[in-house]
Image (spheres, rainbow, N blue to C red):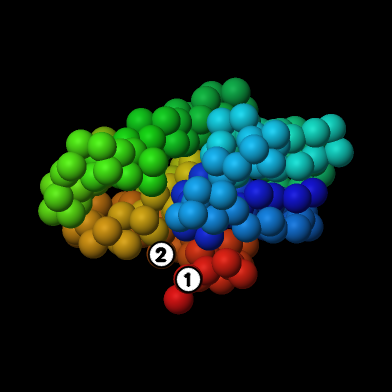
Amino acid sequence: MKLYDYFRSSAAYRIRIALNLKGLSYDSIPINLRTCEQCSPAYRDRNPQGLVPALETPQGFLSQSLAIMEWLDESHPESPQLLPGDIWLRAQIRSLACQIACDIHPLNNLRVLNYLQGKLGVSDTEKTDWYSHWIATGFEALELQLSGSGFCIGEQPTLADICLIPQVYNALRFKVDLSPYPAIRQVYEHCNQLAPFQKAMPENQADAIV
């Protein structure tokens, strides 16, 4: 498999964690979002949205991180499950994952922040305020739903943890105060002790900018 990737992309970061947890090998193909490489016709042939990640599989190209992770789970059931347990637990995991991937992340991703500054002319301070506001709004609700086990829910890393860790990483990069969220910080610290999460960290990628 080939993962079309960018080291700081939260969505691509999720897929790196998922592949590592599943023990699956892949080739990383860096796509430079800062130079708009994702906008090129060659890349849009792979992913018409012009976003990362895209995963090249034996069946073809797949985009959208949640869809990719569910495909990985269903196509490789022999490895640790990202959606384990009964139907109720899986629904709870999906709920947490969607809160992060569908409600928090889209408001704060690179193309939104670029639009705020490039088209609407907001200042750096206003951009940071925007980012911090939506992180706080999402994290306040999320904090109340975590299990306190060291993972978001249950006793093993799941789709929810895979979505949370990149979001916390980027919140820290934007210097968001995470002291009001001890349960979130516990999950972040616990998961980052595990090799699959460490290997997926942005600074450990070949295209990382030091």
Amino acid type, mark 1:
Ile
Q: Using the image as rendered, state which of residue 149 and residue 83 is in the foreground.
A: 83
Q: Residue 188's quadrant in the figure?
A: bottom left
Specify whether 153 is left or right of 117.
Answer: right
Q: Is residue 94 above or below residue 130?
A: above
Where's residue 210, x and y in %? 45, 76
Q: Which residue does the numbered mark 1 point to in the structure image?
A: 209
Amino acid type, mark 2:
Glu
- Residue 68 seen in render: no
Q: Residue 54's quadrant in the figure?
A: top right
In terms of secondary structure, where does tag 2 sit?
A: helix
Q: Which residue does the numbered mark 2 point to in the structure image?
A: 189
Spatial separation of the CA atoms under disc 1 and disc 2 = 23 Å
Where's residue 60, x and y in %? 80, 33
Query: How many discs mark residues in the rendered view?
Result: 2
Specify whether 95 is left or right of 141.
Answer: right
Badge nearest the viewer, 1 or 2: 1
Where's residue 41, x and y in %? 64, 38
Q: Using the image as rendered, state which of residue 149 and residue 8 is in the foreground.
A: 8
Farthest-out residue, front: 41
How crowded pointer 1 is (Cα within 10 Å; few <14, some 14-19, many 20+) is rated as few
